[in-house]
Amino acid sequence: MTKTAQRAYVASAIERGLLPGDAMRRADIVSLKASNDPDVPIQFWQLFSVLGPDPIIQIVQDFYVRVFADEEWFTSVFARVGGVGYHINTQASMWADVMGGGPYYHGADFRLSFHHTHNAIALMNDRGAARWVTLMNQTLDVSDQYLPDDPRVRVSLNTFLTHFLGKYAVEFGLGDVGAFGAVNGRF
């Protein structure tokens, strides 16, 4: 999923003037390893090189603990698919995969699309997306304990989440369901 997500984001970022037209040919942009230069943004497919697996798993775990402690209308959709452990394992795999960690998430985009279209369709609306965004923001707001002291990391996480939420907004006709904060600006 790393390459698929990377290509989709780069194409969109070029169109919006955030990345240069030759971004897919620039090693400093497409590399899976983040720059140590604090002035160079971390692309979300470089996050694994900075974080490794443990912080990713911890953020996803904290999020799903919140999901399963939430209101019944929201939690029930997740519970029908599997328990909290199932969701932590599959989503941490997807995040690690998209963040440049390797092929962890089996089924890639097809599986993710199938899941949203068939298993989670009851939440693929403005109300469900807004609740998801609220819980994710609550999770990210307390995730500093797992993240390195580098403000580029949170901005890159926001960029990752904003990119995927934007994809779902188009796919499922969602309105403005919220934001995650500052995202990567012009490269």
Image (spheres, rainbow, N blue to C red):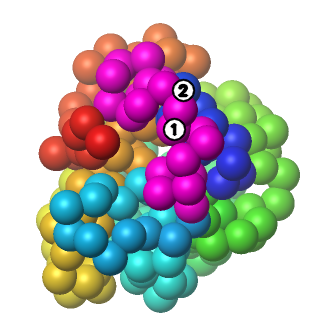
Q: Is residue 138 magenta?
A: no
Question: What whole-number distance in Å separates the C-alpha atoms at marks 1 and 2?
Answer: 9 Å
Q: Secondary structure at mark 2?
A: helix
Instruction: Give the total number of marks visible in the rendering.
Output: 2
Magenta span of residues:
12-31
Type of amino acid under label 2: Ala
Type of amino acid under label 1: Ala
Q: Secondary structure at mark 1?
A: helix
Q: At x 28% / y 59%, what residue is drawn?
A: 40
Instruction: Judge the density around disc 1: few (<14), some (14-19), many (≥20) Cα neighbours within 10 Å.
Output: some
Q: Are marks 1 and 2 in contact (CB under 8 Å)?
A: no
Against 173, residue 135 (above or below) is below
Q: Which residue is mark 1?
A: 23
Q: Position of residue 167 (x, y in %)?
A: 51, 27
Against 152, residue 177 (above or below) is above
Q: At x 49% / y 64%, what residue is drawn?
A: 46
Front position in the image: 108 or 51: 51
Q: At x 50% / y 16%, what residue is drawn?
A: 170
Front position in the image: 69 or 156: 156
